[in-house]
Amino acid sequence: MSSTISSGGPPIVEVAELTRVFGTRQALAGVTFSLAAGECLALFGPNGAGKTTLLRVLAGLLRPTSGNARVSGVQLPGGALARSRVGLISHHTMLYEALSPRENVLFAARLYGMRDARARVENSLSRMSLIDRGDAPVRSLSRGMQQRVSIARAMVHSPRLVLADEPYSGLDDSGARALTALLGELRAAGTAIIVVTHNLAEGLSLATHAAVMQRGRFVRYDAAERIDAGSYAATYREALAVG
Amino acid sequence: MADTLYGAWLIARKDLAIEFRTRSAFFSAVIFALLGLVIFYFAWDPTAVTVTDLAPGVLWVIFTFSGLLGLHRSFGVETDDHAIDGLLASPVSREAIFLGKAIANLIFVVVVQMIAIPALVLFYNLPLGHIAASLIGVAILAAVGLVAIGTLFSAMAVNTRLAELLLPMLSLPFFVPIVIAASQSTAKLLTGRPVAEVGAWLKLLVAFDIVFVALCTLAYPFTVDD
């Protein structure tokens, strides 16, 4: 299934017939969608459906085998310009355990060429309630706190596209609420977001679009006004059963 | 170019900060170097081999193998929680990542060398005198080439199950020409040979450095772009 549903405005993400093959396994099998500024796509699907592969292609970490993908008008793999517009939250924290949260986020801010790096770091840490633990080594933090640092790191350069792969993993209620509020504010500020999650309620509460992936394809893709949580749950269960 | 160098410096500084906090590879490399000196000392018969004949071999064996300990750690710190993805998803170029790693490794190897050379002088009662500065120059020149090769192979080996075995297996054959040039230069310096004789080996070292740094920098993106 391909979808070009978009609620107006220039697209931040445009994906057309995207495929990615690993050896003999087709991880992405012709994915097509677009997402405009301020829109949020919630992506569901069983393990191995291709969700993470799609995010890694959009983050510039994987080259597509065929098809087209553009981020902010830049064709992927688009080098530094495309990567500078993306914020990636993974289920891996991507942090250096020997460094503190403040050092990790500052390192990221400088990699992204932020002139006001220190101010941005404090703002990001503050948003994730990390100011008090900002100087402790990351390895001394709990998994949930590390996830908060990872989120602060991904947001420090005000990306135009946020790719969030199971961003709620490890977060407690307070962390999850902070993340939901942050994603909502980013959307309001015009950031496009793609969230991969196994929690239907969480994903649908944020989404302007939702999709279910199975074996590298979108088997369902809907805009917010057509999303029915009940039927989505049924499609998701079917996808899980098929694998 | 300026962006690449700035990115490289950021990455090198981050790697050195991590090594400074953990000191895991540094202490391993220094202890290895000192143990190597001690073992060679007790295996040495001063009535059969003079210290100036022995020292170049001892130095370059311990420099080569202690350097490998740091090189293995170089990309190891990026695998702990997939930190390498954060680097690769950032706008810094792949070349900057390689150069940053190589700069941090070079500083690491040179610091180990600066501890090992005085230890050699002390253990073997080796009169360095006026050639100390030249010997340090040779050590740094050789370190540049060794680090370029080792950094590239560290990146290639890090995601394999046998990384600790694979890194020396891949690197050592490429280290050979550099180690030959460096040990020959060291031997000629220690025996007081004319500068012209040393100069030829130094030119070869510089040529190796240029070739290996350029080739490894260009090759690195192919090891990470999937």
Image (tube, coloured by chain):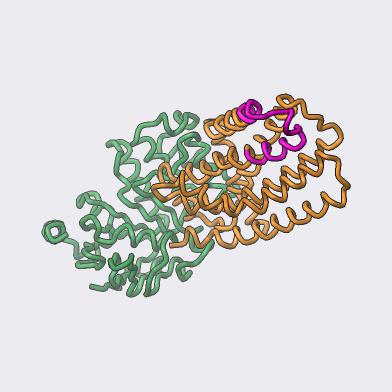
Chain colours: A green, B orange
Main SS category, magenta section: helix
Q: In the figure, residue A148 lies in which quadrant?
A: top left
**From the image, which quarter does the C terminus of chain A lie in?**
bottom left
**Observer-nearest residue: A51 or B144?**
B144
Is A9 on the left or on the right of A113, as rendered? left
Residue B194 visible within the image: yes
Q: Which residues are magenta?
A: B37-61
> Is residue B86 toward the left or the right of residue A238 in the image?
right
- Residue found at the far front of this picture: B48
Query: In x, y percent, where is residue B46?
Result: 73, 28
Q: Residue A148 or A67: which is nearer the viewer?
A: A67
Viewed as shown, does residue A38 lie left or right of B57? left
Instruction: Give the number of callouts.
Output: 0
Q: Position of residue A61 (x, y in %)?
A: 43, 59
Q: Nearer the viewer, residue A128 or B16?
A: B16
Tell whether B99 sits left or right of A202. right
Residue A13: percent from left, percent from top:
39, 66
Residue lying at 21% horizontally and 49% vertically, measured from the top left? A199
**Which residue is rendered at x = 31% and y = 55% of the image?**
A195
Query: Can residue A120 be seen in this snapshot?
Result: no
Quarter of the figure that contains the N terminus of chain A = bottom left
For this rendering, which residue is in front, A216 or A74?
A: A216
At x 67%, y 36%, the residue is B58
Asked if the magenta segment contains residue B17, the reply would be no
Where is residue B6 drawn, in percent x and y?
64, 51
| Figure check: B13 above or below B124 | below
